Image (spheres, rainbow, N blue to C red):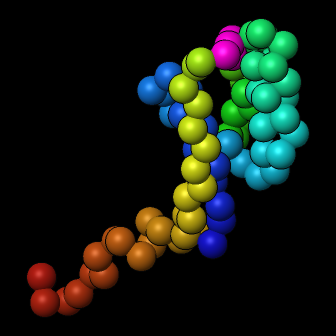
Amino acid sequence: MAIVNRLTVDGRDYFLPEPVTELKNSILEAIKAGGGYVNIPPLRGGPGIDILFSPGMPVTWSQIDVGESAAEETAPEAEDDFL
């Protein structure tokens, strides 16, 4: 199983790959400094997004276990009875 991290900032969700330790530290430092922009990397590629973090802003971290073949597990199997 793969683990995806969900960062919720002011009601918006951002899904992030591992590792997130450095990102957590960057967010904490921006808040301690009274506010600052932190680049949130994308899950699959691209430039990411800059978010302005400030003291009092609601930020929540969570981890989600995602099966690597989840699409295959939920797809119905074809059977000859339908012909």
Q: Horizontal and vertical percent for residue 56?
A: 59, 18
Q: Horizontal and vertical percent for residue 39?
A: 78, 22
Q: Is residue 53 magenta?
A: yes
Side of 42 relative to 75 (left or right): right
Side of 23 relative to 59 (left or right): right
* Residue lying farthest to the left in this orientation: 82
Side of 39 relative to 68 (left or right): right
Residue drawn 85% across the image and 24% down it: 29
The answer to whether residue 69 is seen in the rendering is: yes
Residue drawn 58% across the image and 50% down it: 62
Residue drawn 78% across the image and 37% down it: 24
Observer-nearest of 72 and 58: 58
Q: Is residue 76 magenta?
A: no
Q: In this view, does 20 lie above or below 64?
A: above
Highlighted range, magenta = 51-55
Residue drawn 23% across the image and 87% down it: 79
State which quarter of the image contains the C terminus: bottom left
The answer to whether residue 50 is seen in the rendering is: no
State which quarter of the image contains the N terminus: bottom right
